[in-house]
Image: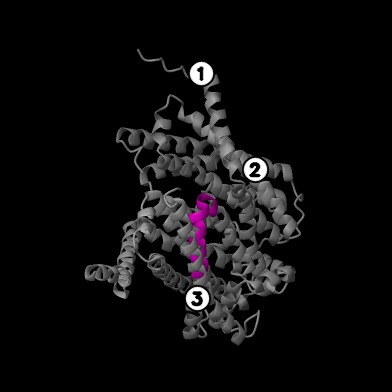
Amino acid sequence: MYAPIQEITLRSHWGVIWGTFIVRLKTISRYKGMLLMDILVPVFLAAMPILLGQALSGSISAASSNFEKNTGLVGANYVAFIIIGANVFATVTTSLWLFGFFIRREQTLGTLEALFMSPAHQISILIGLTLYVQVRSVITFLGGYFFGCLLFSVNPIQGQVLLALGILLFGLIPIYGLSFLLGALVLKVKQANSLLSTLQWVVGSLMGVFFPVTVLPVTFQVLAYLFPGFWLNYNIQAALMGLEWFFINMYGHLSILFIFAITCPLIGYMIFSKTEYRSKRAEGIGQF
Amino acid sequence: MVLATHKQERIYGKRAWWNQFWSMTKKEFTVLTRYKFSFILSFVQVMVIMFVFTVAAMVLTPPDQESYGAGIMFYSFILFMFLSTALWDIGNSLREEQYQGTLESLFMSPISYFSTLISRILSNVIWTSLNVAIAFLFMSLVFGQLPVENLILGIVVLILSLFVCFGFSFGFAGLALQYKESMNTLTNFLQFFFMIVCAMFFPFSALPDIVLIVSRLIPLSYCVDLFRSTMIGSTPELLSFELEFTIVALFSIILPFLGILFFRRTVTNARRRGTLAEY
């Protein structure tokens, strides 16, 4: 006689979500240096173009005027633009990578098969993970943003700060959807580290991290508009810096993010489920 | 007795050293090129990074300074790539051996540590040099001709700088064996620390005076300044050309020597404690 597998109830769903969330949180709390680097890396990234611009132009104001001339963003503070961009970029890449790396780590440790064959619903595990990334992203975004602003003498509470925070929380939902796609890719390709690192920079160029995408050729601009990361970054920059809401108005921009927030997780989860099912059938889960 | 001497020569002689070095280099190359997907993507990645940072530099610089800005960005990036290789790849490659369970047998066998490290360095230097060449072509095609004022002297300075970088690398490989997983965070931090303090993507004039004091204490800063100014044809910012060249040449001898000493000590300690196989 086998013990009956516990029925999946709402309570057990919540148990799995909470369990996954706590495990990840405890793990990262043991690597404090990693958390500190999450905050410092975007500031280091932002420092490079800021300092280069300043050195080549002679002063911050001269660099600002070059930025205005070359990008058409009149009155925009280029230092704030880059600091916000670098922090959103770091948050988006952490969110994009997390699920793929989670899969890869469990695969390497040899626990992925057991995890996927357990009677817990995949959705609960994914929500637990997503919750963890959400908390980590907000903490590191705020840390990086405030530290960057302090370092480069920018007022961090200019513009609509609460709206920007809301956009960040909501705008990461489509990114999680895309991260499921990457998770599927990791299941399929296995050695996906190099692909993820390359994609990170492609994403960076399409998000308008250090410069608005309008300076890129039209093909790149079209690609950028199809990527939710661009809208997330631009909307936060618009909320904090008062940039123009160029697609109808603010609600137009938020609607686009809303559409992505519905479609991306659905498509991502569907593709991931299919890939996972195929991998299970073809003995591919435990192999790495 | 004759047989023992013969064996000893085979293990420790010059020829044996070359054999070990050649076999290991071949093995490293084989591993590198077997992962074709990663191999090709590494070139794409370099081009994308160069593209992002160069456009970022160009929107902030006056039109007459664009070529100079792109030059600073590109030549700094070359050294940054070699530094990253030095900081990450050698240590990681030894950690990989540790994961695979082959490090202990490798270091307990009567082979030279030096040849193990040099073979890993050589394969990575060749790979990074290929990346640099492709990036140069890409930059010239997309952003126009980069300034190349003194190529021969630039290459000499680059080679000396590589010795400085790989001096760090030996030390980091030792630390990676000692501190294992925790080294990743430290390496990550130091990579960005060097990037800012050694002014790897911008002129030293952009740094505040207090940071400049730290910059002057790090030999890598002189490598960056000397290589960049030689290639672009500008005056070095930190010291005179002669002084910077002397410092770089001196440290290109001292640092690898100190690095190897440190690495040997770490391995000997790990062998004594029996921690070579622990990861």
Residue marked by disc 1? A9
Horizontal arrangement in the rendering, residue B162 relative to residue B103 (left or right): right
Task: Write the residue at 31% across / 73% down.
Answer: B13
Q: Main secondary structure of the magenta part?
A: helix
**Residue A254 visible (yes or no):** no
In this rendering, is residue B114 above or below B234?
above
- Rounded to the nearest angstrom, the CA distance separating label 2 from label 1 is 30 Å
The circle drawn on residue A138 is 2
Within-10-Å neighbours for mark 3: few <14, some 14–19, many 20+: few
Q: Which residues are the magenta region?
A: B163-183
Work out whether residue B112 or residue B187 is closer to the camera in this orientation and state it. Answer: B112
Q: Amino acid at mark 3?
A: Gly
B127 shown above or below A269:
below
Question: The residue marked by circle 1 belongs to what chain?
Answer: A
Q: In the image as oriented, which residue stretches furthest toward the top?
A: A1
Determine if residue A143 is in view: yes
Task: Locate residue B196, reporting x and y percent.
Answer: 63, 65
Mark pair 1, 3: CA separation: 63 Å
Residue B53 picture location, percent across and down? 56, 65
Q: Residues within 10 Å of mark 2 (few under 14, many from 20)?
A: some
User: Who's the residue at 62% across and 67% down the image?
Assistant: B59
